[in-house]
Image: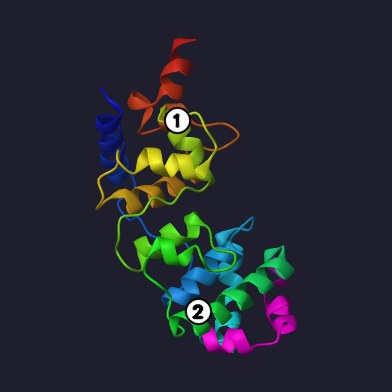
Amino acid sequence: MDDKTRAEKAVELLEAEYPEAICSLVYTDPLQLLIATRLAAQCTDKRVNMVTPELFRRFTDAEAFAKGDINEIEALIKTCGLYKTKARDIKAMCEMLCSEYHGIVPDSIEELVKLPGIGRKTANLVVGDIFGKPAVVVDTHCIRITSRLGFHNTKDAVKIEKILRPLLPEDKSNDFCHRLVLHGRAVCTARKPVCEKCCLKKICDFCISEKSQ
């Protein structure tokens, strides 16, 4: 079985195991997803979802963040960790959105990564979830599980995205990445994967090698 066929099979198996593939961050517009994803760096989605309601009540759009007091932003996001860096990035990205994009979140990865604090992972999430474009969100779960499956042996997120894009069906790549998060939390954990319960075990290099030992 070649990699493309295995990737398509992995998509099919995860789709059956996790019918609902949604982002666990709570948001109502593109800017909120952009900011919530920035806050989620080295922080749980659960914690971010506890912080964002008050943050978005206080700052309702890019202009409000751009003109806002950075000390207030820091105070509201403090429990997310790295709050000074995150607050600086949020304010700077909103200033750039206002000055360069009329306060509107752009719909391409190329434009999104120009914003302060925004990398390809966040940009892919936004274009996939908000704009419905083909996206490959390479987070820690994606890196770990696709490596165990045997698609690569690197931790370089950009390289992994380039490897996975041609293997995954364009209309299912974004949901595939959401399902990897669910699978990574429930079964294919970082510390000890539960291979006997894994829906991917028949096509996973790691599971097959473990079984043969």
Q: Which mark is residue 81?
A: none
Observer-nearest of 132 and 189 = 132
Q: Label 2 neighbourhood size at 10 Å, few (<14), some (14-19), many (20+)?
A: many
- Between residues 207 and 85, which one lies in front from this camera angle? 85
Among the 4 quarters of the image, the one containing residue 73: bottom right
Q: Is residue 60 above or below residue 208?
A: below
Q: Are marks 1 and 2 in contact (CB under 8 Å)?
A: no
The amino acid type, in three-letter code, at marker 1 is His
- Judge whether residue 69 is colored magenta: yes
* Magenta residues (range): 62-79
Give x and y (percent) for residue 197: 42, 32
In the rendered image, residue 192, in percent from the top left (x then y), is placed at 57, 31
Q: Is residue 131 visible?
A: yes
Residue 114, image x, y percentages: 51, 66
Which quadrant of the figure has residue 72? bottom right
Whether residue 196 appears in magenta in the rendering, the answer is no
Residue 199, compared with residue 78, is above or below; it is above
What label does residue 152 carry, if any? 1
Residue 166 at x, y = what percent? 30, 41
Q: Earlier in the sequence, mark 1 or mark 2?
A: 2
Could you say whether the residue bearing mark 1 is in a helix, strand or loop? Answer: loop
The residue lying at 60 percent from left, 85 percent from top is 66
Disc 2 marks a residue whose amino acid type is Leu
Write down the residue under mark 2.
97
The vertical placement of 127 against 103, above or below, is above
Examine the rendered structure and indicate whether residue 45 appears above or below residue 163.
Answer: below
Q: Secondary structure at mark 2?
A: helix
Mark pair 1, 2: CA separation: 36 Å
